[in-house]
Amino acid sequence: MALSLSLTQKQQLKLSPQMLQSFELMALPLAELQQKIASEIDTNPALEIPSGREASFEAFAEKNQDNEKNIDTYSDSSSYGSDRGGYDTEASDRLQSFMENALSDEETLQEHLMSQLGCEALSEPEYEVGMILITNLDANGFHVQEPLGLLNKEQKALFEPMLDRLHRFDPPGIGVQTWRESLILQAQVKGMEGEELKTFSLLVQDNLELMRANKQAQAAKNMGIELEELDELFSFLKTLTPYPGQGFSSGPQLYVIPDISIRKVEGELILRMNRSSLPDLMINKEFEAFSLGKIPKETQAYIQGQLKRANSLMFQVKLRNQTLYKVGQVLAEKQKEFFLSGPQFIQPLTQKCVADQIGVHETTVSRISTAKWIDTDWGIIPIKRLFSSAVGDEGEQVSKHAAKEIIRQILEEHQGKKALSDQKISDLLKERGLSVARRTVAKYRNELHIDPSFIRGTN
């Protein structure tokens, strides 16, 4: 055998530390970004806060409501970052005030999963897909958007193996679409398989409502098993949790800071960025000046490293806010009827549509919308709620969220003695020009946490 050398060329995606930091900051909710900035200020002497400000969205809104220079309509093309005022206080007092307004450290579901992802032996493309899947999870651990729609052609080949890897992470049961799928996945993780898993799936998918209505005999008959086996399966089910992510997300859910506000003012929609909850950041000139003197190489390297970190953080925060502002402009335009008239008027809108309009990748819109909140006349809601697929095979098409609101309204307005069945709701929707199948009605009703008709009728 002869030894030989050969040269080959191949294309490979390399993610720089700056790109990874950009991905991280894009997905961070405002409260967690406060913590990250506070930690960086505390450890990096190259950073300083030039002006003090309190982490209060309402204070910002009240201060600027009469200042036309700080008000942008959704059609305004001005760039992010208008002039900002400050308070003449000592830097240490300003830093203390800012840090007191940041939340105490508490690990979120996404942080918990990202720490596990970082311990895996992955290629950079695999890590990128894993990060996209994790940032697409809601507080329950379920997919917010259809995950395949967030991946490009090359990434889709990695979807199944990375999703399977994610399913093995703690807590078990995350990375699915619904709580029913989560329960079945948890059973698999605990070792259930074969016919037993198939029977358990029948219980979870089609017979839980019968169990709640104390119709165990009917459930057992539907599943083709004895009552004793049904009791065993139901007892096992009670050891599982339908929403595995909630144990990690209670902190941010209890204390929400909106990133943007879109409200109706004198008949016109006004878009405001919440600039008050983040400090102005700048380079400490005195620290920077040390690098110009005659100092040892080790000290020079330390100073340059801190300055690089500081500049990178400032750039990434600015990029995050600029992207969020652009997304807010598109939402104000595309979801105008919602902001003016309410949840029933949310229009079908995909993240791809918004991404195309602002000139970024769809995954960027997914990250910047994750765990972000918007203040509206209809309450403070997740930005992702304004993205919705179209519902209706014929006639009028509305968004999924609008269809759910209409179903809720139909059930609340119903005055008859007999509870409306899913088929009857489907028929009523069709009378309104909206074609929604019975199974889809049942799915939306479950998502609204409304019982089926045979249980509602007994209340």
Image (tube, grey):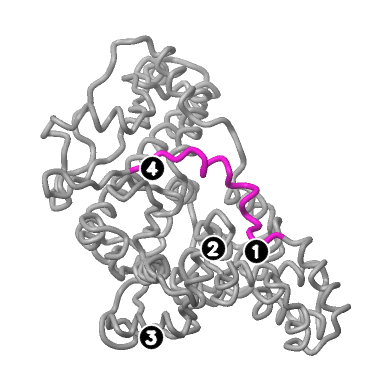
Label 3: few (<14), some (14–19) or many (≥20) C-alpha neighbours in 10 Å: some
User: In terms of secondary structure, where does tag 1 sit?
Assistant: helix
Task: Say whether disc 3 or disc 2 marks the residue closer to the N-terminus.
Answer: 2
User: In terms of secondary structure, where does tag 3 sit?
Assistant: helix
* Residue underneath mark 4: 316
Of tags 3 and 4, which is closer to the observer? 3
Name the residue: 50% across, 33% down: 35
Residue farthest to the right, as pictured: 228
Of tags 3 and 2, which is closer to the observer? 3
* Residue underneath mark 1: 166
**Tag on residue 427?**
3
Of tags 3 and 1, which is closer to the observer? 3
- The amino acid on which the numbered mark 1 sits, given as a three-letter code, is Leu
Cα distance in 3D space between marks 2 and 4: 21 Å
User: In terms of secondary structure, where does tag 4 sit?
Assistant: helix
Q: Quadrant of the N terminus?
A: bottom right
Name the residue: 51% across, 56% down: 135
Along the horizontal axis of the image, is 448 left or right of 428? Answer: right
**Residues under numbered marks 1 and 2 in contact, where contact means CB atoms less than 8 Å apart:** yes
Q: Which residues are magenta?
A: 241-259
- The answer to whether residue 177 is seen in the rendering is no
Task: Say whether disc 2 or disc 4 marks the residue closer to the N-terminus.
Answer: 2
Q: Quadrant of the C terminus?
A: bottom right
* Residue underneath mark 2: 133
Task: Say whether disc 1 or disc 2 marks the residue closer to the N-terminus.
Answer: 2
Task: Say whether disc 4 or disc 1 marks the residue closer to the N-terminus.
Answer: 1
Cα distance in 3D space between marks 1 and 2: 8 Å
